[in-house]
Amino acid sequence: MLVEALLALTAAGGGAVVQAAGTDAWNGVRSGIARMLSRGEQAREQGELERLDRTQAVLNAATEGEIEQVQAAQAAVWRNRLEMLLEELPEVQRQQVAAELQAVIEQANATGNGQSVHNDFSGSKFEKSAVQGSGTQHNTFS
């Protein structure tokens, strides 16, 4: 049985998979999770990559009315896979994999869901104007 902190970490890992799907972070998260679950076995890693691709396809195919349910279900799938992995490992390896998982989660979180906007305003005149949007914005006025 895993301790509460590791259970929270696996839940965050499942959420990171769902969060990263369809963003700029996807390839990094995808390869990190596959590498972790395969534990260095090339054939297993390919299988994990295919499972992750199916997850992305399921998330992309979800309609607006079902997206939250599909996201929760997919996050649970990956949480369970990560829990099973950690349960099978000896303590030393468990801590190493937990650190790897934390790094993947941070990578997914660092992208801000892949929403980044960069605006350059050069030689423009602005009167009573505003720049609006969501996500990370970088505005340069010169």
Image (cartoon, grey):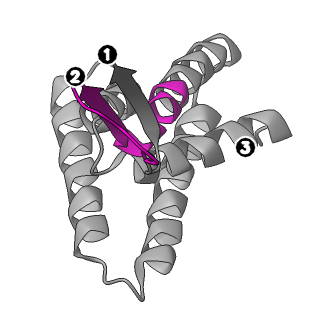
Q: Cα distance, mark 3 to mark 2?
A: 50 Å
Q: Which residue is mark 2?
A: 122
Residue type at mark 1 is: Ser
Residue type at mark 3 is: Leu
64, 120: nearer the viewer = 120
Dots 1, 2 in contact, CB < 8 A: yes
Q: Earlier in the sequence, mark 3 or mark 2?
A: 3
Q: Cα distance, mark 1 to mark 2?
A: 5 Å
Q: Which residue is mark 3?
A: 7
Residue 68: x and y, percent?
A: 50, 75
Location of residue 41 by image quarter: top left
Q: Is residue 92 left or right of residue 38?
A: right
Q: Is residue 103 left or right of residue 74?
A: right
- Span highlighted in magenta in the image: 106-131
Q: Secondary structure at mark 1?
A: loop
Confirm whether the magenta stretch covers residue 111.
yes
Q: Earlier in the sequence, mark 3 or mark 1?
A: 3
Q: Is residue 118 left or right of residue 69?
A: left
| Image point (62%, 43%), residue name | 12
Q: Secondary structure at mark 2?
A: loop
40, 141: nearer the viewer = 141
